[in-house]
């Protein structure tokens, strides 16, 4: 896998540790601010809607009070119940109605309204100039018919055509039938109307930094709005949510998000609605956001540039050191790093130069030692006597001894020839215990002629171990060590024992020599585990035996030093796996 440079890691980690928190905080702040502003805008719209609702109800209550003043006035009912039959009565009736209208205009309704009182005989009293066809237009209007159906209850009609003149603006009208002395008798009709412009002014909120559209709607879907064209196009989008009397929600109109709040006027069963455009509310915030993002991106670009420059400056020394290391790895030791900074990299470069210098010196020394070693081997080879020549010479002397009849010399030469032959054939590393015991017997024969027959040799051989394979020349060094260091007293005794313990073969050499002190025993154990000198025979010593066994069979096997039993002082034992086939590998041992 391709490695990632320290410079790249430094850049990316800095970007992650710095930019992610900045962007996260920015996004969280903007989202929180947008949410708070949206809630505040919605709360403001609700307050404004409540105030609009109060103002509309005030106008409607004034019209209700005016209607009550008319329908409860006995003089007005008398005029309607007894239509004038003479000019004088007509003038009196008109005068009576005018006083009532003046009373309403001065005491109840301050805004200009159209007041119309009609009887059932075709007479109509108004505070506006009657025009041709006005009487018929009123009697044919929906609000007139609805008032007749309500039989004395008030009816409200929103944004209907002007009955005075079709060229004038629409009206908002309160209409109710006037009852006589009998509750079942209608003696006339009261109609109080206002121009819709007055309500549109109430719905319109000025001096706002964003668009705010208000409208009113009755149960039949008639709408009074300051922007009728927009409301008529957008109205179907939020009609289902307007079924609640009091609600606030968010809708999407022509791909634009808006907040809608609505209230209810119980007097007339009308809805009052305010619509706030998100785009206008958040326009300035979005501009600030765009400026902040642009500034942040520019700052990030500058930051990345500075970061790259700084990382190059900080890692240039490391890259130079890395380049020198690659040259050393390829075998070029004639390199030196020239970094003089007083930081960790400077310290590394100085130590690198010293290390390369020492390595170069060490390799040169090893080359020289190898050359000296090869020369020494050559000299040793030149001085070495060919062991085969020596073996053949001993055989010649042996036959001469046989011909001379010297039995002792012949027996000694036979034993020496056998041992020499065993050491010459180095290709065979393992032999059977039987062969190894025979080899030891030849060695003991030579020792008997050298030192005399002063040591009693006892063999305790387990027949089951005779065919087991052991390393060649493994017992002989132990027996030789007994002759060299046993320091026997009179009646010296040497026991050679073989045993099979579970899946191991143990070869023991036990003697009754003077034994070892604890210090000497410790030195011998350290000698086996560390560097020790070889034995005097064929270059094979105790340590050699121990190391060969561990190399061949594992660290759990080898030579061990123990205490003999009874009058026996020393016990050297060799442990190795039990194998009757030379090519058999004990499970888990090798």
Image: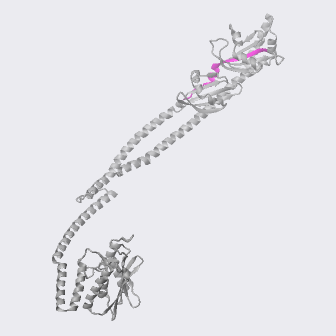
Q: Is residue 194 above or below residue 424?
A: above
Q: Position of residue 152 (x, y in %)?
A: 77, 19
Q: Is residue 559 left or right of residue 47?
A: left
**Quarter occupied by the C terminus:** bottom left
Task: Locate residue 124: give its quadrant.
Answer: top right
Residue, far top: 87
Let me know if residue 9 is in the magenta part. no
Q: Position of residue 534 (x, y in %)?
A: 27, 79
Task: Locate residue 220: give its quadrant.
Answer: top right
Q: Position of residue 509 (x, y in %)?
A: 35, 85
* Span of residues in magenta: 187-209
| In-front residue for pair 263/443 | 443
| In-front residue for pair 574/185 | 574
Residue 213 seen in the current view: no
Task: Locate residue 344: give its quadrant.
Answer: bottom left
| In-front residue for pair 29/505 | 505
What residue do we see at 26% from left, 62% from top?
Answer: 356
Q: Position of residue 488 (x, y in %)?
A: 32, 91
Residue 107 seen in the current view: yes
Q: Is residue 127 above or below residue 238?
A: above
Let me know if residue 192 is in the magenta part. yes
Residue, far left: 382
Residue, far bottom: 490
Q: Is residue 402 left or right of residue 22?
A: left
Q: How is the image coloured?
A: one colour
| In-front residue for pair 314/498 | 498
The count of marks equals 0
Residue, far right: 181
Q: Is residue 396 left or right of residue 353?
A: left
């Amino acid at each position: 896998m391709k490695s990632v440079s320290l410079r790249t890691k430094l850049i990316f980690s800095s970007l992650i540790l710095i930019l992610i928190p900045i962007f996260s905080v920015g996004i969280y702040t903007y989202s929180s601010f947008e949410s708070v502003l949206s809630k505040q805008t919605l709360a403001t719209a609700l307050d404004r809607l409540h105030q609009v609702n109060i103002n509309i109800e005030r106008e409607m209550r004034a019209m209700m009070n005016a209607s009550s003043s008319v329908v409860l006035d006995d003089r007005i009912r008398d005029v309607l119940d007894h239509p004038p039959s003479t000019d004088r009565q007509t003038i009196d009736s008109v005068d009576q109605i005018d006083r009532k209208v003046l009373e309403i205009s001065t005491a109840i309704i301050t805004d200009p309204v159209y007041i119309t009182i009609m009887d059932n005989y075709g007479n109509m009293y108004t505070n506006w100039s009657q025009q041709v066809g006005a009487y018929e237009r009123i009697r044919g209007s929906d609000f007139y018919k609805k008032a007749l159906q309500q039989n004395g209850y008030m009816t409200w009609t929103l944004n209907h055509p002007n009955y005075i003149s079709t060229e004038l603006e629409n009206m908002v009208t309160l209409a109710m039938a006037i009852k006589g002395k009998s509750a079942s008798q209608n003696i006339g009709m009261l109609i109080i109307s206002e121009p819709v412009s007055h309500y549109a002014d109430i719905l319109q909120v000025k001096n706002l930094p964003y668009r705010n559209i208000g409208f009113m709607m009755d149960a039949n879907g008639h709408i009074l709005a300051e922007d009728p064209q927009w409301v008529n196009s957008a109205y179907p989008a939020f009609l289902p949510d307007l079924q609640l009397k009091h609600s606030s929600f968010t809708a999407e109109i022509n791909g634009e998000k808006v907040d809608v709040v609505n209230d209810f006027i119980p007097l007339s069963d009308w809805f009052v609605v305010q619509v706030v455009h998100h785009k206008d509310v958040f326009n300035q915030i979005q501009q600030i956001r765009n400026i902040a993002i642009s500034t942040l991106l520019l700052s990030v670009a500058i930051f990345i540039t500075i970061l790259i420059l700084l990382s190059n400056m900080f890692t240039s020394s490391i890259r130079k050191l890395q380049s020198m290391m690659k040259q050393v790895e390829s075998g070029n030791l004639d390199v030196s790093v020239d970094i003089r900074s007083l930081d960790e990299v400077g310290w590394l470069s100085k130590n690198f130069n010293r290390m390369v210098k020492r390595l170069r010196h060490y390799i040169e020394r090893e080359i020289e030692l190898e050359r000296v070693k090869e020369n020494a081997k050559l000299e040793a080879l030149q001085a070495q006597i060919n062991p085969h020549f020596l073996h053949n010479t001993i055989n010649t002397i042996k036959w001469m001894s046989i011909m001379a009849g010297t039995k002792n010399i012949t027996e000694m030469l036979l034993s020496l020839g056998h041992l020499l032959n065993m050491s010459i054939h180095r290709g065979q590393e393992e032999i059977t215990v039987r062969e190894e015991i025979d080899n030891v017997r030849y060695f003991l024969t030579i020792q008997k002629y050298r030192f005399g027959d002063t040591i009693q040799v006892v063999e305790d051989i387990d027949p089951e171990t005779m065919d087991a394979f052991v390393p060649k020349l493994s017992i002989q060094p132990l027996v030789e060590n007994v002759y060299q260091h046993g320091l026997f007293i009179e009646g010296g005794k040497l026991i050679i024992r073989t045993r099979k313990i579970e899946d191991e073969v143990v070869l023991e050499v036990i003697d009754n020599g003077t034994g070892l002190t604890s210090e000497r025993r410790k030195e011998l154990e350290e000698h086996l585990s560390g560097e020790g000198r070889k034995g005097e025979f064929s270059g094979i010593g105790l340590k050699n035996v121990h190391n060969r066994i561990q190399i061949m069979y594992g660290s759990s096997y080898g030579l061990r030093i123990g205490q003999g039993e009874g009058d026996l002082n020393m016990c050297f034992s060799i442990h190795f796996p039990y194998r009757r086939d030379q090519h058999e590998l004990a499970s888990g041992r090798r």
